[in-house]
Structure formats: structure tokens, C-alpha cells
Image (cartoon, rainbow, N blue to C red):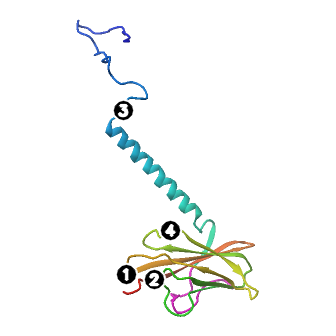
């Protein structure tokens, strides 16, 4: 069924070409390939944006007073410290020797000059997203927070990581970042 519209053309020829009777209309009509491609690209962009938003909202670092580490340190050799006034945060992982991916790593955070409610450690790839590596530590009777963590495997010969330590106190959140590298075994 065609609907005729009033014509405002100045000459005798029709102002528009009517749609053919066999033109597909409705839910059964197929979409052009370019439209399907644009819909797919839009859906992928929305999924990536949601993943990015969720990934960064779950990360530590919201409303944290960051403390710089006191000196460059080597987490492969022992504890690293950060000082804020009279407060000192010391972070140790892996014990003695090299830190390796895919191994259970003992984590320890000791504090002096500040009382902590909770301590969390997150490992973040400095040059690439390596996934979500977030670990809550438990308080020990000696006042040291302990737990275990693990790093994911990377195909690069040397993977640069950052350990983010966040301490929840009565006055807010304190945190520090410690950089370290992990070499791929057999390198």
C-alpha cells in the first residue's frame, strides 16, 4: 500500500520515487553490512569502556595520602620503607632472593607511629595491564600485617611491576608505591 503525498514540484515530473512494493520493511528486513559493523564496533567500545571503568574503580588509590619511599630500594633483597613525619611503613615481599612470577609470595607490612585498621597490597604492571592482583593482609599479634600474594606470568624477559601498599587508619588512608622488576625464568 502506497501513500501519496501532495506534490510541490514545479514541473510535471514526480518529486519523489515511490518505494517498490517488494522493499523489505519490518523486523525481517536485513540490515546493511556497514550498519551491522557499526553496531558491533559500538558494542565493543561500550564493553571496553565498562571494563576500564570497573577496573579502575576497583583499584586501590581512591582518596589516599601517598607517601614516597624514603630511598630507592630493592624488594628482592629485603624490606622497603616509606616515612611520613614520625610514621614509618615498611613493606617486604618474597623473603630473600629473587621475586618470581607464579610463586606464592609472603607479604609483610609493619608500621610504626600509626595504628592501622587494615592493610592491602596490589600489584600493578608499570608498562602494561596485568590483571587484578589485590591482596588483603591480616594483622598479626606482633603488629605486623601478613598475607600471601602472587604475580602473573609475563612473556617479556623483564616485567616491571609496582607494589601499591594502602593502610587504612583512623585518620584516613595512607599509601606508598614500590617499584620492582621480575625476570622471566630461563632468561
Q: Secondary structure at mark 2?
A: strand
What secondary structure is found at the residue carrying circle 3? loop
Asked if marks 4 and 3 touch (Cβ < 8 Å), the reply is no
Q: What secondary structure prevails in the magenta region?
A: loop
Q: Answer whether residue 170 is visible to the viewer in this image.
A: yes
- Dot placed on the residue nearer the N-terminal end, 2 or 3: 3
Disc 1 to disc 2, C-alpha distance = 10 Å
Residue 157: image tag: 1
Sequence-first tag of 1 and 2: 1
Local packing at callout 3 (Cα closer than 10 Å; few below 14, some 14-19, many 20+) is few
Q: Which residue is drawn at the image coordinates 48% and 52% (left, top)?
A: 47
Q: Are marks 1 and 2 in contact (CB under 8 Å)?
A: no
Residue 54: percent from the left, percent from the top? 55, 58
Regarding mark 1 in the picture, which secondary structure is present there?
Answer: loop
Range shown magenta: 68-87
Q: Disc 4 vs disc 3: which is toward the camera?
A: 3
Q: Quadrant of the N terminus?
A: top left
Q: CA separation, marks 2 and 4?
A: 17 Å
Residue drawn at x 57%, y 91% is 95
- When the figure is inspected, residue 100 is found, relative to residue 57, above or below; the finding is below
* Residue that badge 4 annotates: 131
Q: Within 10 angstroms of label 1, few (less than 14), some, or many (20 or more) residues?
A: few
Inter-mark Cα distance, 2 to 3: 53 Å
Is residue 88 visible to the viewer in this orientation of the structure?
A: no
Please, what secondary structure does the residue beneath circle 4 have? Answer: loop
> How many numbered marks appear?
4
Q: Is residue 31 left or right of residue 163?
A: left
The residue mark sitting in front, 1 or 3, is 3
Q: Nearer the viewer, mark 1 or mark 2?
A: 1
Amino acid at each position: 500500500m502506497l501513500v501519496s503525498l501532495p506534490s510541490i514540484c514545479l514541473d510535471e515530473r514526480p518529486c519523489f520515487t515511490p518505494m517498490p512494493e517488494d522493499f523489505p520493511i519490518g523486523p525481517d528486513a536485513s540490515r546493511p553490512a556497514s550498519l551491522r559493523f557499526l553496531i558491533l564496533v559500538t558494542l565493543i567500545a561500550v564493553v571496553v569502556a565498562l571494563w576500564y571503568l570497573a577496573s579502575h574503580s576497583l583499584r586501590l588509590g581512591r582518596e589516599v595520602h601517598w607517601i614516597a619511599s624514603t630511598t630507592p630500594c630493592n624488594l628482592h633483597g629485603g624490606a622497603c620503607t616509606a616515612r611520613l613525619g614520625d610514621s614509618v611503613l615498611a613493606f617486604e615481599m618474597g623473603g630473600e632472593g629473587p621475586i618470581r612470577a607464579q610463586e606464592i609470595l609472603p607479604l609483610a607490612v609493619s608500621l610504626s607511629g600509626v595504628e592501622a585498621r587494615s592493610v592491602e597490597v596490589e600489584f600493578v604492571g608499570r608498562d602494561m595491564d596485568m590483571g587484578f592482583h589485590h591482596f588483603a593482609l591480616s594483622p598479626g599479634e606482633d603488629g605486623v600485617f601478613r598475607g600471601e600474594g602472587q604475580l602473573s606470568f609475563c612473556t617479556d624477559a623483564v616485567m616491571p611491576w609496582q607494589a601499591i601498599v594502602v593502610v587504612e587508619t583512623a585518620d584516613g588512608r595512607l599509601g606508598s608505591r614500590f617499584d620492582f622488576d621480575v625476570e622471566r625464568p630461563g632468561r
